[in-house]
Image (cartoon, helix red, strand yellow):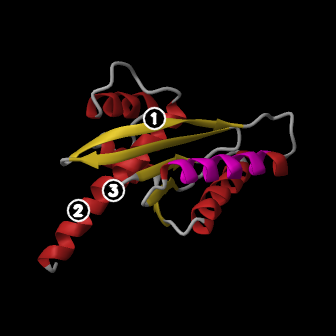
Amino acid sequence: MLIMGIDPGIAISGYGIISNEKGKPYIVDYGTIRTSPKVSIPERLRILHNGYLELIDNYKPDAIAVEELFFNKNAKTIISVGQARGVALLSAALSNIDVYEYTPLQVKQAIVGYGHADKIQVQQMIKIYFDMNELPKPDDAADALAVALCHMHSYKLQNIIDSRGF
């Protein structure tokens, strides 16, 4: 199974693509899609959309996991992140790929074991889990890998539950 994780953002949107080989997840690719604050919001959203579609076309993921919004005191930030998140969801829907959504709390709980972990703890656990030589950077890309891994664990657990008739 090939899973694409997305940590949406208007300036920096992280992506992480993972797969599973012989029961061991591994990283296929990760990085960011960046937009400039010097261009209009519609143009930034177009850049994100084209970036997501290019990744989907190149890797053909079986599922896309997107981090849900967290409440932020800055209304302008939450609106722009919401717009970027909408573009991610739309890109997946237009590509007919199943979308799964996880809160930051769920992702941190699944990866670190503590729902209020900070960004460096998530980066360290991703580094350890995937046996990387250095911390995955930037943290947006590490978060996207964490979202993808959270889905992989959730998917496996759901299959176990379904197979046992719980």
Q: Is residue 86 left or right of residue 20?
A: right
Q: State the separation of the CA atoms marked 2 and 1.
A: 22 Å
* Closer to the camera in the image, 45 or 51: 51
Category of crowding for the residue at label 3, using alpha-carbon neighbours closer than 10 angstroms: few (below 14), some (14–19), many (at least 20): few
Which quarter of the figure is the N terminus placed in? bottom left
Q: Is residue 121 above or below residue 114?
A: above
**Residue under circle 1?**
142
Q: Amino acid at mark 2?
A: Leu
Q: Which residues are magenta?
A: 44-58
Q: Amino acid at mark 3?
A: Met
Label 3 SS? loop
Category of crowding for the residue at label 1, using alpha-carbon neighbours closer than 10 angstroms: few (below 14), some (14–19), many (at least 20): many
Asked if the residue at tag 1 contacts the one at tag 2, i.e. Cβ–Cβ closer than 8 Å, the answer is: no
Label 1 SS? helix
Residue positioned 38% across, 45% down in the render: 18
Q: Position of residue 166 (x, y in %)?
A: 16, 78
Category of crowding for the residue at label 2, using alpha-carbon neighbours closer than 10 angstroms: few (below 14), some (14–19), many (at least 20): few
- Tell me which corner region of the image, top left, top right, bottom left or bottom right, holds residue 119: top left
Residue positioned 54% across, 48% down in the render: 58
**Residue under circle 2?**
157
**Residue under circle 3?**
1
Could one spot residue 48 in this view of the protein? yes
Could one spot residue 115 in this view of the protein? no
Main SS of residues in magenta = helix
Residue positioned 50% across, 31% down in the render: 139
Label 2 SS? helix
Q: Decide which of tag 3 and tag 2 comes sooner along the chain.
A: 3
